[in-house]
Amino acid sequence: MSSVSRTKMMKSSKLLRNTWPFRKSANLRHVISSVLLLGISTSPVHADNLLEVVDAALQNNLALNSAETGLRAAEYDVDINRAKFLPSLNASASTNWNDGKTHQHQAPSLDNGYNNHGVNITLSQTLFNLADIYSHSSAKVDLDIEKLRTEQTRQSIIRDTATTYFEYLKARAQIRATQAEFESSQTRLRLITRNVELGNVAGTERYEVLAQKERTANTLRSLKKDQRIVLTKLETLVLQPVSPDFDLQSAVDFEPIGNQQQRQLNQVMYESDYQLLIAQRQVTQSRQALKETGADFVPSLKGSIGYTYDNTNDATANVFPDKGVTEEAKYALTLDVPILNGGRDYYRYEQNKVNIEKAEIDLEDRKQQSQQSFDEFIYNINDFSASLDSLAEIIKANYASYIGIQKAHKLGTRTITDLLSAESKLFSSIRDYENARYDYIITTLQLNDRIGNLTPVTIGKIAEQMSPMNDSKADSPIPFHLLAQ
């Protein structure tokens, strides 16, 4: 490895919390000529930068609104379980009209109509119930899980919105290069057709140029279709029209992530990855469920105080309370000892023991999946970083080759097939370069999502590296940062 390569690999990419691994580099030597310049007219529209689009998605996205609403509902579960520890007061009142008739053989029938009414007030309090204690703890764990899921949804909205934004820019860059190739093929077709008519070249050369033009036109049509699909997806996430007209600034370089920083980011992942945190809480949740079912075997104690008032107005009554008012106070202390319920509690307890084992297995599986995703993101980011320098050199080499073959074709020493092949290689290398640039950014966003570090602050750091696109930048299919100052 050369000293320059070692120096580059030793540089820190600064991809820690709320940072962005970009650095500006000096502009490369001018490598294009007027032959490849492409004029694209744009209509004036409102330009939305990345941070504005992400903020709009966080405000409007229905999935996030649903998650936040579910969180508010889950907060009441804790209050519902807390109510088991508070006293309950119940009151009831009743009134009855009694109308009776007694038919006698030896005497006249007797009619008896009277009203009795009364009230009852009972104050009760659970003094000890282990199941209620564990149930309350389980409700708090459930709330923690719901909070994590809400934050995970919020981060997913940021990830999906930002990556779709860059997918749109990626498609736009592809269209820009392919449009330039298409217009170049159109110009060549007109020239070759004119030369065939004048008898300067063989007619077969026109067919090769025509075939390449149609292939390019078909590719361009597919790219525009894909761009419309991406824009529709972005507007669905944001729920409003979007015009992504901010792009990465010129002369931005992308660095690899070194070994030391990989270890730091890996540690952050195990502390902040929402999927891991949720899996850990689910293990705790299973253990709480086991404690809750185990409490079904423990006695519970409940106390109550009641007061009853009854007023009976039965004129024919001849037993207590006869005709009059009855007041009664009742004090109760109830000890409930579970003995046997057909084995249901026992099997529930055993089932929850198995559920703990399953939750622990799921947690370990989640750790392995997160680690695998983390490693893949690191490998891809470093591969994109390493490939960008090579792709830049390939563009310059292909351009120089294209210019040379173009001159040789005019002199008659190279065929039209050679020229078309050189042009295809040039524009393919441009598209490969643009793909690597935006894929680096998209993968970095996914990495930040994996380690639980994707926030509006992180997006703001990215937005600082972007600026509005204008006509002068859109004029050339060559990547902007390869242009000389």
Image (cartoon, rainbow, N blue to C red):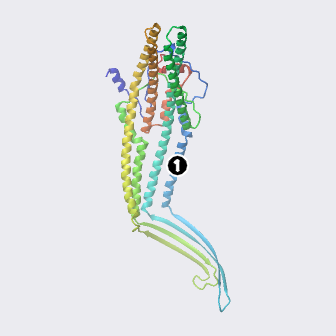
Q: Could you say where residue 324 lies in the image, as x and y percent from the top left?
A: 61, 80
Taking the spot 50% from the left edge, 33% from the top edge, the residue there is 164
From this view, report whether residue 14 is shown above or below residue 290: above
Residue 127 visible somewhere in the drawing: yes
The image quarter in which residue 326 lies? bottom right
Q: Nearer the viewer, residue 211 or 225?
A: 211
Is residue 171 found left or right of 382 in the rendered image?
right
Outermost residue, left direction?
1
Outermost residue, right direction?
108
Q: Could you say where residue 281 lies in the image, as x and y percent from the top left?
A: 41, 49
Q: Nearer the viewer, residue 108 or 232?
A: 232
Under mark 1, the amino acid is: Gly
* Total numbered circles: 1
Q: Quadrant of the N terminus?
A: top left
Q: Secondary structure at mark 1?
A: helix
Residue 256 visible somewhere in the drawing: no
Q: Nearer the viewer, residue 282 or 475?
A: 475
Q: Could you say where residue 278 lies in the image, as x and y percent from the top left?
A: 43, 46
Taking the spot 59% from the left edge, 21% from the top edge, the residue there is 41
From this view, report whether residue 457 is shown above or below residue 415: below
The image quarter in which residue 46 lies? top right
According to the picture, the residue beneath numbered tag 1 turns out to be 70
Mark 1 is surrounded, within 10 Å at the Cα level, by few (under 14), some (14 to 19) or many (20 or more) other residues, namely: some
Q: Nearer the viewer, residue 227 or 61?
A: 227
Q: Could you say where residue 406 lies in the image, as x and y percent from the top left?
A: 46, 11
